[in-house]
Amino acid sequence: MIFLTTLPLFWIMISASRGGHWGAWMPSSISAFEGTCVSIPCRFDFPDELRPAVVHGVWYFNSPYPKNYPPVVFKSRTQVVHESFQGRSRLLGDLGLRNCTLLLSSLSPELGGKYYFRGDLGGYNQYTFSEHSVLDIINTPNIVVPPEVVVGSEVEVSCMVPDNCPELRPELSWLGHEGLGEPSVLGRLREDEGTWVQVSLLHFVPTREANGHRLGCQASFPNTTLQFEGYASLDVKYPPVIVEMNASVEAIEGSHVSLLCGADSNPLPLLTWMRDGTVLREAVAESLFLDLEEVTPAEDGVYACLAENAYGQDNRTVGLSVMYAPRKPMVNGTMVAVEGEMVSILCSTQSNPDPILTIFKEKQILATVIYESELQLELPAVTPEDDGEYWCVAENQYGQRATTFNLSVECSVPVLSACGQGFAHVLPLLEWFHLSHPESLGGMLSLCITLVAPLILLESHCAAARDTVQCLCVVKSNPEPSVAFELPSRNVTVNETEREFVYSERSGLLLTSILTLRGQAQAPPRVICTAHNLYGTKSLELPFQGAHRLMWAKIGPVGAVGAFAILIATVCYITQTRRKKNVTESPSFSAGDNPPVLFSSDFRISGAPEKYESREVSTLE
């Protein structure tokens, strides 16, 4: 603090002391530049009753006691001084007027220290005063900066230098103040203890760019080469500003993502990464990384970085988009329909970016959309030709997934209705006949049959090669059957769950199961294939290749047509006979009772059906 005092306390104390006691008054500390001079103001007093004729005095350096032989700075009686002070010290005050002011010239660092005054009134009337002054030899001006400099608030910076040399007066100038403000010289001011200072002031409003700025003050003495400089770095406090951050980030699912947030502030900010109000990471630092290992679509979203300190805060956001291949499509719609009905099937998936969705049947594209997550397939009036397996495929640049589903079309009018309900007993046989000899029916009939109970196709057989036997059982049914192989001679039954022996593959409504038996050195065993679902069970002893063919293969197409006609006539006769006898027989199954079943399996890019390992089965009412 700077004081401009017209009547210093020092002189008030001197005036009040008149009257009588030993005492001295001088500044407790005083400073001066090296190479200049310093005047140490001093007043002393003694009892009035002593009334000395002559008053002498001595200045000692660093000790008040003569018995310690301290260096003599000045001595009025003999003018004998210590060699360090020869030609450098003289008394400015009049001891008779109780003024003991001392002048030291050509200051050097070794002259810095404590100075004591001793009054000598003659005889025993000598007194060394405990009061003393500490001289500090300096080389730099003192720049005073407020304890807190805040951006946007005006501050006052002062440059202060001692002005206690009557022979040399300092002049002040600012260094590096360009852009801050114009300095003003306050002038020569007197301090509390009677010392003097030169003061220059600089007023400015700091900016964040001024933080760390090196501001200097120079003290020079005219007509000399003496120049002294001092510097201070500005510590400007300001709120955070986020200066470094990722732009929007796109990352592939499973990759590593690193988000960076950097802020400029003083003091350092508390950086916090957040998402949806949850703190993910925070630290007091200039920059902070948020590392995401093996990102998932669940981490897709907006991330916020908050920077704050005692002077304010800032925040910014960055979007993370996780790119991934389509998920397995979901199919929701009608899987069983009556001929002529409208069918609507919805296929949906999730991916980023949105996929190309396609529904096709037997490599024929039925519907497709681009960059949509849903695809609607509508069939206004289904026909038996619409029955079968369909694929819904979703694809983007990161991958492809698909789902298969079956559409079952039931007949609106029962087959051969003239034969009555009794015809239901021979539906499996007719289906077998149709599958074995489709050319035999020609234009006679247009069968529309919904399969229910399992049907083991005639290509089922066994074959032996060396010590290995392989049996093939091909079953057509809806819903999907379970298949087992029985070896009666060995009292052994093997089913699909025993993958070591049985391999199964599904394609549409056909299930192909292969039994492999190794180490069969003896005659091949009998093998019976049994297929079972909710609507029936079918068993067939599998023939070995080379055995006699069935009758249908021997009689040829013409004979087959004749036999088929005889079979139809026989069935009609039996039915009419039962009606006459009023005997009611319940058919083993009816087409209207068949539950619609949906099969879904993974799609492979090659388009080939995959290995039949697992399926999702759902029944639609």
Image (cartoon, helix red, strand yellow):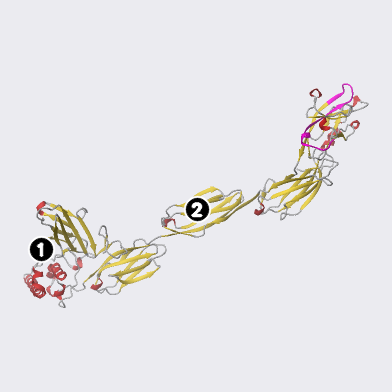
Taking the image as shown, residue 338 lies to the left or right of residue 282, namely left
Q: Which residues are magenta?
A: 103-127
Q: Is residue 431 above or below residue 322?
A: below
Viewer-nearest residue: 606 or 17:
606
Quadrant of the image occupied by residue 39: top right
Viewer-nearest residue: 593 or 278:
278
Image quadrant occupied by the C terminus: bottom left
Extreme front residue here? 466
| Residue 546 image label | 1
Extreme bottom residue here? 443
What residue is shown with label 2?
274
Of tags 1 and 2, the one toward the viewer is: 1
Extreme right residue here? 53
Query: Which element carries disc 2, helix, strand or loop?
Result: strand
Q: Is residue 532 above or below residue 68?
A: below
Query: Which element carries disc 1, helix, strand or loop?
Result: loop
